[in-house]
Image (cartoon, rainbow, N blue to C red):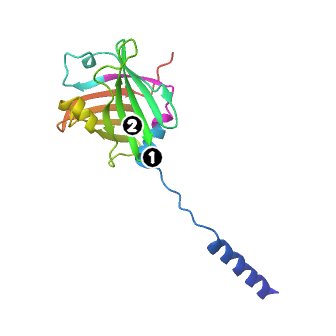
């Protein structure tokens, strides 16, 4: 009887080991993980300030900044970026099977697109679940030739509870804004 139990145990083990298809759990790409981390903040608003800008005469230099992670679907996050009372800017992140696209949607007060709109680029492989880099794409280079070397960075810093939006051009800092995620703005 003991040998029958042993044989049965070996057969069951063999069936379980060899008969079951092994599936490895695939980790999401870093751009997907970043998208989901940002998606988790949907509906929240965060105040910010400009830490650095080369555009000293622009409203971004000393204006009040607000980002609103307003609209979120499984494939798109829209974040109005408000400077003072100007709500013409929206950051748009679109999740594709092969990457994460970041665009700047600029609109006139009546909702029509501005001439300089939908510029940005695709996330690079250097990103993490909390930080993504977006070099300017071909459309951006054609639309704004001076921006051909732009690289935008978006970062969610869980330790400092800050969201960072950073822009460099020609490998030099151009703009940096920091938003306080520790104290979301309530309506």
Determine whether the residue tagged by mark 1 lies in a helix, strand or loop. loop
Q: Is residue 154 left or right of residue 185?
A: left
**Is residue 14 within the magenta segment?**
no
Q: Position of residue 121 (x, y in %)?
A: 31, 37
- The part of the chain drawn in magenta is 38-49
Q: CA distance from mark 1 to mark 2?
A: 25 Å
Residue 157 shows which numbered tag? 2
Residue 97 shows which numbered tag? 1
Q: Nearer the viewer, mark 1 or mark 2?
A: 1
Residue drawn at (46%, 32%), measured in percent from left and top? 77
The relative height of residue 44 versus residue 169 in the rendered view (above or below) is above
Whether residue 136 can be seen here: no
Q: Position of residue 184 (x, y in %)?
A: 47, 23
Are discs 1 and 2 less than 8 Å apart at CB?
no
Q: How many marks?
A: 2
Work out which quarter of the rendered image holds the N terminus and state it. Answer: bottom right
Q: Position of residue 65 (x, y in %)?
A: 35, 19
Using the rendered view, name the quadrant where residue 154 is placed.
top left
Determine whether the residue tagged by mark 2 lies in a helix, strand or loop. strand
């Amino acid at each position: 009887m003991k040998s029958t139990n042993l044989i049965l145990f070996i057969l069951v083990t063999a069936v379980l080991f060899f008969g079951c298809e092994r599936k490895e759990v695939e980790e999401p790409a870093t751009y997907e993980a970043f998208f989901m981390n940002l998606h988790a903040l949907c509906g929240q608003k965060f105040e910010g300030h400009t830490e650095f800008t080369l555009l000293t005469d622009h409203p971004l230099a000393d204006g009040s900044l607000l980002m609103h992670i307003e609209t979120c679907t499984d494939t798109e996050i829209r974040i109005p970026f408000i400077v003072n009372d100007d709500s013409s800017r929206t950051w748009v992140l679109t999740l594709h099977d092969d990457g994460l696209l970041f665009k700047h949607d600029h609109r006139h007060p009546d909702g029509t697109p501005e001439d300089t709109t939908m510029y940005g680029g695709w996330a690079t492989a250097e990103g993490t679940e909390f930080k993504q880099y977006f070099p300017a794409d071909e459309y951006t280079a054609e639309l704004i030739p001076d921006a051909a070397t732009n690289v935008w960075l978006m970062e969610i810093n869980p330790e400092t509870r800050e969201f960072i939006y950073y822009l460099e051009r020609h490998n030099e800092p151009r703009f940096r804004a920091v938003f306080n995620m520790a104290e979301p703005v309530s309506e």
